[in-house]
Image (cartoon, grey):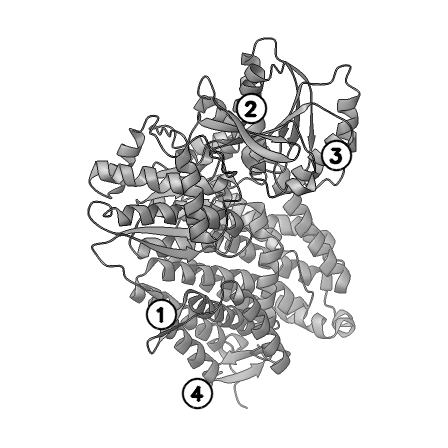
Amino acid sequence: MKKLLTGFAGATVIMAALGVGIAKADDIVVGFATASSGFMQAYDKPAQDAAMIRIDEINKAGGLLGKQIKTVAADTKTDRAEGAKAGLEVIDKGASLVVVSCDYDFGAPAALAAEAAGKVSFFLCAESIKAGIQGVGPHSFSASVLAAVQGATMAEWSYNKKKARTFYRLLDTWTEYNKGICDGFDWMLPKLKDAKLLGQDTFKNEDTSIAAQITRIKSLPQQPDAIMLCSMMPGVVSAVKQIRAAGIKSMILNGSGVSGGYWLNATPDLSDFYVPDQGSVYGDDPNSAVNDFNKKYKAATGGEPSSQYVYPGYVMIDVWAKAVERAKSTDADAVVKELEKMKDEKTLFGPRTFTSTLHHQNRGRYLITEVKNGKPGVVDEWTISEAIPVEYLMKK
Amino acid sequence: MTHRPSIFLRSLSTPLILILVLVAFLALATFMNSGPFNQVVIDGLVKVTLVVGLYVFIGNSGVLSFGHIGFTCLGAYATAWLTIPPLMKKMALPGLPEFILEAKLPYGLGIGFGALFAGAFALVVGKILMRLSGIAASIATFAMLAVINTVYSNWERVTGATSSVVGIPIVRVVWPYCLAAVVSIVIAHLYAISRSGLALRAARDEAIAASASGVDIGRERLIAFVISAVITGMGGALSAHSVGVVTPDTFYLNLTFICLSMLVVGGMNSLSGAVMGVVVLSVIIQVLRQFEKGVSLGGTVVSIPNGLQEIAIGIVMVVILIARPTGLTRNQEIVWQGWPFKRVSAATEP
């Protein structure tokens, strides 16, 4: 037993000695407390790569406040307790900006650690209103756009541009994100004159068959012009396939969760399928700078962006760096103040607005991607006519 | 006639040594004064509390319980209900009763109530479950875990369903966790040397003989079940305060199996095994994690691929169990009988 005791005592001392690394005092440090293993890695890694591209650009252009940006990273292992540790670790290494996991649930522990230490934290691409002031605190932000905006955008766009008047709402109750899309749709629909909801239904992402739901749609006296499908990977693919196989021809409106063409092989010849995107991953973005970014991304990572969820990472560093320049400091309160002054601040992927009550986008420009004969392409863009009120979102 | 000291005095060195080990970690954390290292130690101490809680029931009764992490969930949510600022609670968890909605207790009280809540629940459920024995009891406890998880994952207005519950005060100092682990060790030890603890171990080793000698097995098991629920409930509340977020899936299979593995690797029939299992496995995990990040040894950076830690820890556990099927401590307690330490079989003398 003595051996055992001395053994672990020795091990702890070694471990403690290895623990600490120190950054140079004259660098600005960005800390990534994100997942580099576990399932969240699939979401965090691409957005983080995009953030690195922006950091590179800034460093090459002379840095921030005359200093180079240095990055440190700690793996959350897609685990909440490890997330808190990862947050503390990057703060310990001097991070003035703590970047946390894409998803609110997995990013929150690290963001809370940053908040407690008085540091600015950014969720890579969380789309829940909780990812910010409401669920973390006054120094926390999200780089993406609220899920509700996606639902509202699709409703208003299809009403105006596709003359859709009758809708059907199909909600996959698996995640908050899905519910968020439908919340935005619910908020927008009553504002559209003569628009009518013919019916609504729910299913679960893991359901292998949605035959019952499809039967209910088919037995409606009149087929809807559009189906608002609030769902995400992986279950959404099967749902779409079943809807089309049943001969339902209505257009299908979605959230950004189905962005990207990687899954379309599973639904050959899919048509009348619409997706909101912050930027185009198909090489046809109306803004040529986005297409240039895609090339840069390919050069850096070896592949095209797989979905629009790459982009918020770039936006995040962009707006944060601008705020630091304007505040002339990395002090959290000063940076937050500058971020909150941003109103329709131009970024590569649409304007960004932050206020003292909302560190997220309750309005935003979206490109509309149409999938036609199995091929995705940008056909339009749309910004909802008014922002979704924070009070409405909080009640949900 | 030689006077034999009481069992309390004879066995006193075991909890003292274990407590010293934990206090050494507390001292090391204070000395290091580094945020992430503190968090590692906190995490370890929470695990010590949980595994000691498991030991109280599993070690003494010999019934493998898969359900105790359910109590951890109860404790964590109970302290969340009581310590989150009322304004946030009204928005996130509007279904709570009025007096809980208005409550804003300090974290110490929250942890206390969390532990009691888990204990009260165990008393009710245990009354039924403790009539079972062997594999039936194990499966029943597992069913209890599944029921608790399902209820907490779906009761939107009271638990926030699968959404994260935030606003729990975060405690980043180490001593409360150390104190809780020490308290749980003391409780576990006192129970083990109590009349009930002895009776239950007798029933574990020879059920029929114990029964014939007047041991009410169901009753003794229930006592152990409730005490261990209080400790694991306290551990759950602590884990809520260490991260600041609770979700039902944190307290499910992953945590169940890591805690059971720590107990089995340490030696599940001894308190020393429970503590040592956590300490040894936690240290190995941390060392492997350092290697994942890269360690510079004599100028060259040695690193292992991300995710290898989980595989390596599995292999380490297998090797330990092959070499020592009864755990690192061979199911014995560490006692002080002059230098060096000696092991005494837990079966004959705690």
Name the amino acid type tagged 1: Leu
Residue indicated by mark 3: A242
Would residue B172 be visible to someone looking at this image? Answer: no
Confirm or deny contact between disc 3 and disc 4 (CB under 8 A).
Answer: no
Name the amino acid type tagged 4: Gly
Tell me the distance, in whole angstroms, between the alpha carbons under discs 3 and 4.
75 Å
Would residue A317 be visible to someone looking at this image? Answer: yes
Determine the secondary structure under disc 4: loop
Chain identity of mark 2: A
Identify whether A207 is placed above or below B22: above
Name the amino acid type tagged 2: Met
Tell me the distance, in whole angstroms, between the alpha carbons under discs 2 and 1.
52 Å
Which residue does the image show at 62% across and 35% down from the upper left?
A375
At label 3, counting other C-alpha atoms closer than 10 Å, the crowd grade (few under 14, some 14-19, many 20 or more) is: some
Tell me the distance, in whole angstroms, between the alpha carbons under discs 4 and 2.
77 Å
The disc placed on residue B338 is: 4
Determine the secondary structure under disc 2: helix
Chain identity of mark 1: A
Residue indicated by mark 1: A18
Mark 3 and mark 4 on one chain: no
Residue indicated by mark 2: A154
Mark 3 or 1, closer to the camera? 3
The location of residue A184, given as percent across then percent down, is 54, 24
